[in-house]
Amino acid sequence: MPTLTAAALTRFTEALFETAGVGPAEAQLVARSLVDANLRGHDSHGVMRAPFYIGRLKDGGLDPHAKLVVEKETPSSMVCDGGWGLGQVITYDLMHRLIAKCESTAIACGTLKRSTHIGRLGEYAELAAERGFMSMIMANTHGAAQRVAPVGGKRPRLGTNPICIGMPGGASGPFIFDIGTSATAEGKVRVKKIAGQQVPSGWILDPEGQPTNDPNQLYGNPPGTILPLGGDQAYKGFGLAFMIEMMCGGLSGGQCAYPEPPPPVGNCAFFLVLNPEFFGGQQHLLQEVAQLETYVRAVPRIDGVNEVFLPGDPERKTLAQRQSAGIPIDEGNWKALTDLAGQLGVIPPAT
């Protein structure tokens, strides 16, 4: 299994995008975003996405020159159109604008439609937390990329519809709770498919609604489905996904899920940024976060359990490991990247 430093993988990914026609600044931003996802253990949102992004660029589904268009704006809100531009470029622009608004108002809210894949939601929550702000971010799949069936159904109707809540403070950094509303992210199934590996039990169902470990079942005709979050109470995960679908596709002016959708196109998204100073106060929030963390971490542990993980802990632990030892990439996904590099005339880094 190839292992690369973050710096080498970033340079390689940046070169792929630049050679494909993305501007230097935009290529740098997207490459950094993807590698940061790998560094934190979110390989489903990491460099394995590069072939898909560049494929969308080649077929005209992604405009590398598109800029954020603000359709409506108030002192505390924005309604935006991404013009099918690079999701990370568009979303960073939107988040910086919302954070700037929140300097002088309690709440800043924004919606986004017609954006290609915006990547890991947690990175935008981290951006807000760096300024001391709380945030909530959610996304749907612009009506396409349907992967999750309602409980009792055997055909997909919704995407994996992630939600992220970020809170400043914490002894080791902000608390970032970033999850899909399904049992796993679709990208994690795709990673296993490309790698030629089985998926764990409890992730997906085959087209007849039966449990399977074969990731290819998700992409067949008819397709299988990813289970909603919640196990025996999966209606909770699907209910959350259903509400997110409406908040993102409906409020943004984009699209909710609809019959006979196209292949994956991107995201609609909803963003909420809050300035604690206008509520209970910044210092009060940080004091309460600190005492809550201390209290929860001090819980008596079950025999054999060495530590209790809180939101953001797994990412910080993986970040430390991969900054030191490098980022592992399975053979299947590395081959997809090197095949793309061969098509573009980019020399892959040594592994």
Image (cartoon, rainbow, N blue to C red):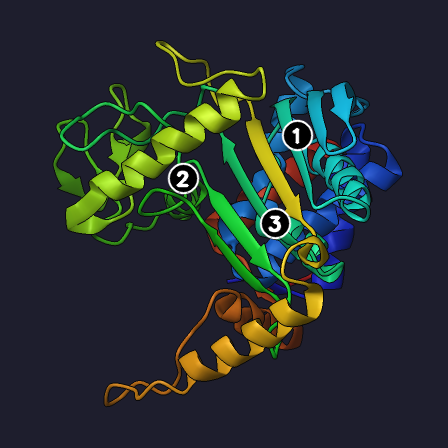
Q: Is residue 197 above or below residue 170?
A: above
* Amino acid type of the residue tagged 1 in the rendering: Ile
Query: In front: 197, or 303?
Result: 303
- Give the residue pinned by disc 2: 186
Q: Specify the farthest residue to the right.
A: 24
Dot 1 lies on which element?
A: helix
- Give the residue pinned by disc 1: 54
Q: Residue 135 — which label?
A: 3
In space, the residues marked 2 and 1 are separated at their CA atoms by 19 Å
Residue 72 point in image, percent of width and height = 74, 18
Residue at 48% from the left image edge and 76% from the top image edge: 292
Of the two numbered discs 2 and 1 on the same chain, state the one appearing first in sequence: 1
Residue 309 point in image, percent of width and height = 42, 74
Q: Quadrant of the C terminus?
A: bottom right
Q: Is residue 219 visible?
A: yes
Query: In front: 123, or 351?
Result: 123
Q: Is residue 90 above or below residue 99?
A: above
Q: Are the two marked residues, 2 and 1, in contact with CB atoms closer than 8 angstroms?
A: no
